[in-house]
Structures are given as structure tokens and as C-alpha cells.
Image: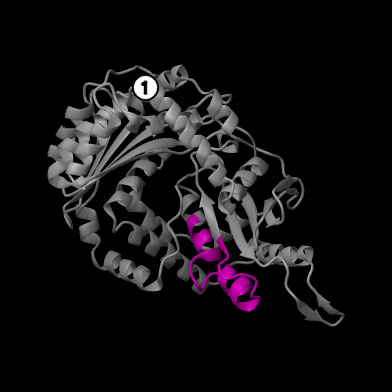
Amino acid sequence: MARVGRLCVTGILAALAWWSATPAVWAQNRPHLTRLRNRLTVITKEVHSSNVVAVSVFVRGGASAEPAHVPGLANFTHHMLLRGTTHRTAEQIKAPIEAIGGTLQARADYDYSMTFLLCSADALRTGLTVMSDVIRHPRFDPAEVEKQREQILSAFARLDEEPGWVLQREMANLLYASGPYSRAVPGTPESVKRITREQLVSFHRQQYTPENLIVVVVGNIDRAAAEESVERAFGDMPFSGRPPTTPQPSTWRPLGGYGTNVAVRSRPTDLAHLLIGFPIGAVTREEYPAILVMDSLLSGGMGSRLMREVRERQGLSYNPGTYYAEYCGPSYLAAYIQTEPVRLVFGLNGPYHTPEMMLNRVKDALLEQFDWVRQHPVTEAELQRARRYTIGTFIYDHQRTVNQARYLGWFELSGLGYQYDEELPKAIEKVTKEDILALARKYFNHYAIALIVPGSNSERR
């Protein structure tokens, strides 16, 4: 799950104050899990602060469940859900959702695919009826398959112009030797062109079973009534008898020494973009809180190490940062920065301004911060600031009903358990300086680098 965007200090402080002052409210809104007779998982949470209800249906597996020789199959399949069912056309799916003022969307990821519904509380049953139909009975009309294929293919050209996408794809290729995390969720233009209707139908039949579904309902609901509505919508799905899908394994690519793997691509852009990725372990209860705090320590707000050292003291970039690519399997923590590739700097021997010098300076500035936390315990004040920032972003994000549903579903399918949504802030509070130092020494020894530099479109490694 992508980390919440950087937040304003006022919002974080308000969230912290709310959480500290109202633990009873958090406790009384505890989620509840039940399983239907067909093994479908249902998680409900009553939140009566507004009349909104969010429903997220997670399908275990996502791109991790597709055959290695058919990359993009999960993404293609999931986007076909909204293009018509055996009972409804695409317009007949859209119309009743719009009539209730709702939103229905679908997206695929590495470890899951998700269909999302947002509506008012009194429209929940109508929304679930449509939602159940699109998940259970997609038609895969040949004409609609071709329309979706063209839409995916046209998106590749746009994605290739986005530095963030290009860098993340390069980083995945550098870090992972094999497995689903080494591939792009949308696949490739070549693989998408080869996907057949029969493969889409087969993948849907294999993966969209009740054992693989997690239905999360959060909002202005009565728990029993919401569970009854889910039972009505999904309870007659036939039990397949197969165990829930587990992600296919992804393996690391060996990284010799203190970082050796480098990929460089040139693009017609004014700025250089740099991404440094450190492989870390899968999401676990033991390490997850410390990784989140480490992320905040490095780039959470103006008091973080990258903002203080790289932006303020050295003036190398306006907004350096980090992100945590958290997966059910091997994950990574990455630092990113964009900067001027050429800058005139006056020294004892006169001005120098080559791109290589500037990029090396930026790279070294980022690595210095990772190396520092690998060799030194952080101060108590720095740790406290990072813990509070991490909790603040988490609580702030929970002010939106849709995000509460997303967290509950992700924690359950990742193996952390849906209860972890309540337990995580307390676990973050317990992270120590020793935890941070041990984490850095364990994971910040090897890295890979992906670069985009100004120039014509090209690629080199």
C-alpha cells in the first residue's frame, strides 16, 4: 500500500490530539470479522460521524497470481469488470451508481485487486447489488475486450513519460531477479496484445472465488444489517474448495558490495531524477512499525533528515523524500530526489558544473543519511518526532472512511490481521533507538540506483 502523502503540520497535530483525547471512541468503533458459509471474509466497522459508507472488495493475489508468461492478465481482467456483466451493460452498471450519488472503481495491484464503492448509507444495498454483479458475472464481451486492450496500450505511452513510473520500473528490474514484483502490474505492450478472452475468463474463474474475497464495509451502518446485505449479495457464490491464493515468490537480484546495480535512462526533461532502493523484508509485525518510523525519520516533514540535510543545509533539492514499497513478499525502501543536473559551483580551482559531478553530489548526500542511521543511534528527540509524525499520518488518513476500509482489507490479506489497524499506533510508540539501528544495519548495506537524465529517449545500464 502506498504511503500517505506528506501532510501539513497542523493536520498531523490535530489528528494526534484527536487520537490522544478519544481512545474510547477508537475502541467502540472496533471492526468485526465474520466468514460466510462459503468462506468469504466480511469485515465491518461502524463509523457514524457521517452518512457515508465505503465498501472495498479485495481479491487475493492480484498480479502475484497471474502466470509469469502472461504479465498484465490480472490488471486486464479486473478492469473488464466495469465493462459489462451477463446482466448489465457498462451503462447499466454506471447509471444506478450515479443515481445514488455513488462511485464505483476498480484497480489491480501486486498482492490484490480491489473494487471500491462509495455511497450513502441508505443506498448500500443497491450499491452492493451492482458491485456483486460486476465482481461475479463479468461478460468479457469480445468488443469490450478490444476496447479495454486499446485503453491499456494507450496508457503505456503516457506512463513512459512519467519519471516516477519509469524509475519505479527500473528499480523493480534492478532489485528483483524473478517473480511478480519484477514485472509491471499492467504488463507490457507485447504481453497485453497477446492476452486472449479465454485467458481473461479462465483467470476470473480461478481467482474470483469466495475464499479469495475480503469484503470490507465501513461507515454509517448497523453491523448486523451490513453483514446481512453482504450475505445477500455474495452468500450464494459457490465454494471452490481451494485454499486462498498466496503470492508467488519473488527473489532478490544479488547486489555486490555497497550498491552496484545502476540503470540510467535519458528523457527530454530539464531536471534529473534519482531513485536509490534498499531491499528489505516482507511485511511482518516484528519490523513493520520500525520501517514506518524509519521512513518518517528520513523524510517525514520538515524536521526529517533529508529535509534538514539535503534540502536546507546543502540546498540540493526542494523536496527529497522516501517511500516504502510494502508487499506481502520482499519489499524495499527507496529515496528519491529531483535536481538540476548542471549547477555552477565556485571552488578553489574555479567553477565546475558537469552533470556527473552534480548527480554524484546528490547521490552521495542521500547515501550519507542512510549510512548515518546505519552507524549511529538516533537521538531521543529525533525518534520521538518520527514516531509522532508516523502516528499522525496514520490517524489523519483514518479521517476518511474509504481509507479505513483500505487499511482493514490490506492488513487482513497481508497476514498482519485486521485488528492491526487498532494495534499499529501503540506498536509505533514502542519503537526504540535500538530497533532503528538494528533495522538500518540489517537492510542498508546494499542498494540499487535508477536515474533519469536530460537527453533524447534512451536507456543504458
Quadrant in the picture for residue 298: bottom right
Q: Residue 382 lies in magenta, yes or no?
A: no
The residue indicated by pointer 1 is 141
**Place of residue 70 in the rendered image (x, y in percent of width and height, measured from the top left):** 55, 25
Asked which colour scheme the image uses, the reply is one colour
Residue occupying the point 63% across, 51% down: 278
**Place of residue 360 in the rendered image (x, y in percent of width and height, measured from the top left):** 75, 63
In this view of the protein, can residue 331 be seen by the observer? no
Quadrant in the picture for residue 314: bottom right
Q: Residue 308 lies in magenta, yes or no?
A: yes
From the viewer's perspective, tell me whether residue 141 is left or right of residue 158. left
Q: Nearer the viewer, residue 427 or 83?
A: 83
Residue type highlighted by circle 1: Asp
From the viewer's perspective, tell me whether residue 347 is left or right of residue 188. right
Q: How many marks?
A: 1
Q: Quadrant of the C terminus?
A: top right
Residue occupying the point 27% across, 28% down: 89
Q: Which residues are magenta?
A: 292-321
